[in-house]
Amino acid sequence: MPSAARFTREIGNMSTNPVNKLSTPEPRGRSIPTQRTQARLRERGYEVANCERKVPISGRGFKGRLVTQDLFGFIDTLAMHKEEWKRLLAIQSTDDSHHATRRAKIKANPLVKLWLRQCALEIWSWGKKGGRGQRKLWTLRRERVVLDSEGKVAFEPPNDTM
């Protein structure tokens, strides 16, 4: 059990540490794409809701293996900007190596067309990029999901920067 003095010392350090003054610090250690996505959105002034949950797939309940289940089968994160709140943004987060898999998953889901009539949807892929011999940094790859003129699901680059 930590002592009260240690607790006070840690709280005091939080206010002087410049990293803690950020609205959303980079997740420590091994962070997953959804954490990175939500941190980036919060930095940009969005209200964020996590829409994925862990569910057990064995009879052992939560002591056994868990699988992540997305909202409607394709939404990891819902975001709404604090000032530009007219459209809800849904995001499917993944690492760079699974971007094509997420595209196929979204294209196969019949609810996507219904979603795109009223709301926005994007795929955010995270990967470590950098030149040879240089430090590798987390890099975001975004792709907007839209309905084309025939009403089919299509993909295009976003028209803004995040």
Image (cartoon, rainbow, N blue to C red):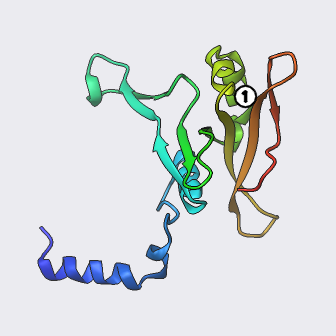
Q: Position of residue 111 (x, y in %)?
A: 61, 17
> Outermost residue, right direction?
149
Q: Relative to 125, is 6 above or below?
A: below
Q: Position of residue 100 (x, y in %)?
A: 74, 31
- Relative horizontal placement of residue 28, taking residue 3 as reference (left or right): right
Q: Which quarter shows the N terminus? A: bottom left
Q: Quadrant of the C terminus?
A: bottom right
Crowding around mark 1 (Cα neighbors within 10 Å: few <14, some 14 to 19, many 20+) is some
Q: Is residue 154 toward the left or the right of residue 90 in the image? A: right
Residue found 55% across the figure and 23% down from its top = 73
Residue 8 in which image quadrant: bottom left
Asked whether 33 or 72 is in front, the reply is 72
Q: Residue at x 52, y 63 (%)?
A: 26
- Give the residue at mark 1: 103
Q: Quadrant of residue 118?
A: top right
Residue plotted at (40% across, 86% down): 16
Of 88 and 131, which appears nearest the observer? 88
Tag 1: amino acid: Arg
**Left or right: residue 10 compared with residue 28:** left
Nearer the observer, 150 or 105: 150
Q: Where does the image place residue 99, in percent across and percent down from the top left?
A: 71, 36
Task: Using the image, determine if residue 56 lies above or below residue 162.
Answer: above
Residue 79 placement (x, y as % from top left): 55, 45
Counting every numbered tag in the picture gives: 1
What residue lies at 68% left-to-right and 38% top-to-bottom?
123
Q: Disc 1 on helix, strand or loop?
A: helix
